[in-house]
């Protein structure tokens, strides 16, 4: 059973073989959600999967600390939309079963999950203190079911294999495959910029719309 705060994921969950339940909340303001109903659903229904935004989990973490509430029924906790603060991660990790996983998900409206950053990958990145983290954000490993391609932002959709940029080069992120909404070419442009490192991790460098074009170069 999937406890989700996204209406889109609640629709897609049955496609992935999961039942779904959603709390009564304003999905535009997840940080204002009443935690009591979340804990009631956890206790009464025992969902194995819980997905939500960082704002929602920050709200829950405040209550978890005060009430010493357990989250031991959960096996997978997915944080969608942005990174989770380290202190909130630590609070939730302490309340989960040791075998449970926390994952950071990256996706779009057309494809809710494109890449996932696992807890083990995050810990390894923290240990390495990599230079990339100073200028970009790690999104994790792309889903194996998806085809992901990075191309020149000023070009079109990916075509031949030689269009793809090499490892470490920043480009526009394109994806295709289930569950991406179909297009004529099969490829969907996410509107984000990123690069793949030598370990296969996807890094976010900003949105294409944030680029500033001048006569001589693009920032």
Image (cartoon, rainbow, N blue to C red):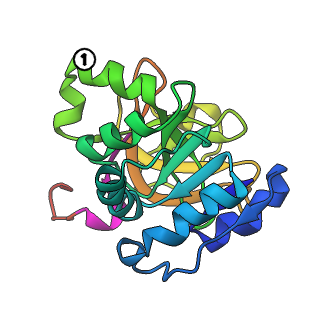
The front one of 140 and 163 is: 140
Q: Is residue 174 visible?
A: yes
Q: Is 53 in front, or is 150?
A: 53
Name the residue located 54 percent from the left edge and 45 percent from the top edge: 77
The structure residue drawn at horizontal position 37% and vertical position 47%, both measured from the top left corner, is 68
Residue 182 is at least partly visible in this image: no
Q: On the image, which quarter does residue 60 sit in?
A: bottom left
| Left or right: 50 in relation to 59 | right
Confirm whether the magenta stretch covers residue 69: no
Residue 188 position, x and y percent, is 62, 58
For mark 1, give the secondary structure. Answer: helix
The C terminus lies in quadrant: bottom left
Q: Disc 1 marks which residue?
A: 127
Determine the residue positioned at 54% across, 71% down.
37
Residue 149, placed above or below residue 206: above
Q: Position of residue 7 (x, y in %)?
A: 64, 73
Instruction: Give 189 or 129, whichever is nearer the viewer.
Output: 129
The residue range painted magenta reads 203-211
Any magenta on residue 204?
yes
Packing grade of label 1 (10 A; few <14, some 14-19, many >=20) is few
Image height of 10 relative to 66, above or below: below
Determine whether 55 is above or below 137 in the image. Answer: below
Question: Which residue in the rendered view is the most extreme toward the front?
Answer: 67
Q: Position of residue 65 (x, y in %)?
A: 30, 50
- Residue 83: where, in percent of width, then height? 34, 48
Total numbered labels placed on residues in the image? 1
């Amino acid at each position: 059973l999937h406890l989700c705060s996204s209406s889109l994921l609640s629709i897609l969950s049955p496609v992935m073989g999961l039942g779904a339940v959603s709390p009564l909340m304003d999905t535009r303001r997840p940080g204002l959600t009443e935690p009591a109903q979340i804990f009631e659903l956890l206790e009464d229904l025992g969902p194995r999967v819980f997905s939500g935004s960082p704002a929602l989990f920050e709200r829950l973490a405040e209550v978890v600390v005060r009430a010493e509430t357990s989250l031991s029924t959960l096996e997978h906790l997915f944080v969608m939309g942005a990174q989770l603060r380290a202190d909130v991660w630590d609070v939730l990790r302490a309340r989960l079963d040791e075998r449970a996983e926390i994952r950071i998900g990256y996706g779009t409206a057309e494809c809710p999950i494109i890449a996932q950053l696992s807890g083990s990958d995050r810990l390894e990145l923290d240990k390495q203190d990599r230079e990339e983290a100073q200028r970009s954000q790690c999104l994790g490993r792309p889903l194996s079911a998806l085809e992901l391609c990075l191309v020149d932002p000023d070009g079109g959709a990916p075509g031949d294999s030689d269009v793809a940029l090499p490892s470490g080069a920043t480009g526009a992120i394109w994806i295709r495959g289930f569950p991406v909404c179909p297009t004529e070419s099969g490829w969907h442009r996410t509107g984000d910029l990123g690069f793949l490192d030598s370990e296969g991790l996807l890094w976010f460098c900003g949105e294409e719309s944030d680029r500033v074009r001048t006569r001589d170069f693009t920032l």
